[in-house]
């Protein structure tokens, strides 16, 4: 029988997350979310991209493959950018 990981581990700090992504910090579009399931459509209709869905995994963040927006799982800061 395979053992399961705990449902939630301590979230990584924002500094750790920013260090993990390969972009300049001042150009990052970081969005804090309360749920692991997120979607992204880019910067709007004219500058957007196809709607894509992601699930935030173990690292505590996910990066959009189209626009490089970073979604960070942090329920206390959800809604902030």
Image (cartoon, helix red, strand yellow):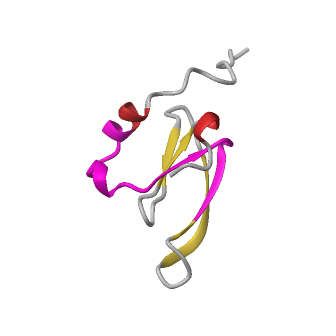
Q: In this rendered view, identify the residue nearer to me: 58 or 43.
A: 43
Task: Judge left or right: residue 70 versus residue 8.
Answer: left
Q: In this rendered view, identify the residue nearer to me: 59 or 25.
A: 25
User: What percent of the width, then of the height, locates residue 69?
Assistant: 45, 57
> Which image quadrant is residue 45 in?
bottom right
- Residue furthest out toward the bottom: 46
How many numbered marks are there?
0
Task: Judge left or right: residue 29 versus residue 80.
Answer: left
Question: What residue is rendered at 45% in x and 60% in y?
Answer: 65
> Which image quadrant is residue 32 in?
top right
- Residue furthest out toward the left: 24
User: What percent of the width, then of the height, locates residue 73?
Assistant: 58, 39
- Residue furthest out toward the right: 1
Question: What residue is rendered at 65% in x and 24% in y?
Answer: 8
> Which image quadrant is residue 18 in?
top left
Q: In this rendered view, identify the residue nearer to me: 14 or 61.
A: 14
Q: Is residue 41 above or below residue 5?
A: below
Q: Is residue 69 above or below residue 1?
A: below
Q: Please state the extent of the stretch shown in magenta in the rendering.
A: 18-40
Is 65 one of the magenta-colored residues?
A: no
User: What percent of the width, then of the height, locates residue 81?
Assistant: 50, 52
Task: Judge left or right: residue 28 versus residue 35.
Answer: left
Q: Is residue 53 above or below residue 71?
A: below
User: What percent of the width, then of the height, locates residue 74?
Assistant: 58, 36
Is 19 one of the magenta-colored residues?
A: yes
Q: Quadrant of the N terminus?
A: top right
Question: What residue is rendered at 36% in x and 54% in y?
Answer: 28
Q: Is residue 5 above or below residue 33?
A: above
Question: What residue is rendered at 49% in x and 33% in y?
Answer: 59
């Amino acid at each position: 029988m395979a053992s399961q990981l705990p449902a939630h581990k301590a979230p990584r700090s924002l500094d750790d997350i920013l260090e993990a992504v390969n972009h300049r910090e001042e150009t990052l579009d970081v969005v804090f979310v309360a749920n692991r399931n997120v979607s992204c459509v880019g910067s709007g209709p004219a500058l957007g991209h196809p709607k894509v869905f992601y699930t935030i995994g173990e690292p505590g963040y996910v990066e959009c493959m189209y626009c490089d927006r970073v979604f960070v799982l942090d329920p206390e800061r959800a809604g902030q950018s």
